[in-house]
Image: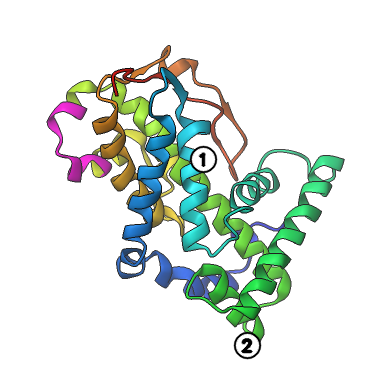
Amino acid sequence: MTQVLDRDGQRQALLRHLTAPFFAPAGLDVWTEAIDRCVREGLEVLGGRERADLMGDFALPLTATVGAHVFGLPPAHAPHMMELAGRLFGHEDAQTPGIRAARREFGLLIEEALREKAELPAADVIGALVRARHGGAISGRELREQAAGLLIGASGTTAIRLAYGAALLLRHPQTLGRVPAGDLVPVLEELLGPRLTAPSAVGAPLARRVAAAALPALFARFPGMRLVGELTDIVWRGAIGDRRPVAVRVLLDVRA
């Protein structure tokens, strides 16, 4: 799949313009209640456990449920669609049988989502792209590729902030103790740096909004949470398109 970065500037600007309102502050405010609800549900899943993988058990499921709302994905398919998008934009050779199969499956799922949007228009990201396609502003291929790029962009940057961001804060307890919950994300962005946060990415505002809701709630729910091992023990996978931790293992507060 052609990545968004490979398009000429004029087409890239158009595609960004179509979806930018959904990631502006006013656009994200619409989803505040849904994001908070997704965070509460994600924390309930962790409740009662002694151990967890913040990547697989919390960050990725949370980005998928939030993505189902903001992007307008079928809730049952959202986690798998984000996983497939990550593979398509990852480091694997585009001609391997696995990637070809992933491309076909992702295309079928996108087409299904697009058909649903055509029948039931909605004020979400996929709905906006479908309207642009029907109006002739973008091609079918651009629609599919933009959907994939946005999915992986939002999924990757959000998951990194939640899982690896939590690990960083656990290794900087002085920061965690003195920073008010409302200021936690700006401090975290500084700790992570631009290479991991991709601040100019289209989905970065959504990632920051989810992190602002999820991280204070996570530490409030599990005040005794501890990182298993060191930051240097965390294994990363992928390339420029999709680089994220494989797992971030923690001991939770068993009293929670």
Q: Which residue corresponds to the image point at 34% horizontal and 67% vertical from the top-left?
A: 30
Residue 45 quadrant: top left
Q: Coloring scheme of the render?
A: rainbow
Eye-nearest disc, 2 or 1: 1
**Residue 12, label in figure:** none
Residue in the foreground of this view, choosing between 70 and 12? 70
- Mark 1, Cα crowd under 10 Å, few <14 / some 14-19 / many 20+, is many
Say above or below: 2 vs 136.
Answer: above
Q: CA distance from mark 2 to mark 1?
A: 34 Å
Counting from the top left corner in percent of width and height, residue 195 is at 44, 40
Which quarter of the rendered picture does the N terminus lie within?
bottom right
Q: Quadrant of the C terminus?
A: top left
Q: Earlier in the sequence, mark 2 or mark 1?
A: 1
Q: Which mark is residue 60?
A: 1
Is residue 176 or residue 36 the one in the foreground? 36
Above or below, 69 relative to 60: below
x, y (%) of residue 184? 23, 40
Residue extent of the magenta highlight: 176-185
| Residue at which label 2 appears | 135
The reply, left or right, for residue 30 in relation to residue 89 is left
Q: Secondary structure at mark 1?
A: helix
Residue that sits furthest to the bottom in the current view: 135
> Type of residue at label 1?
Leu
Q: How many marks?
A: 2
- How would you classify the magenta stretch by its main secondary structure? helix
Q: Amino acid at mark 2?
A: Gly
Q: Residue at x 57, y 69 (%)?
A: 126
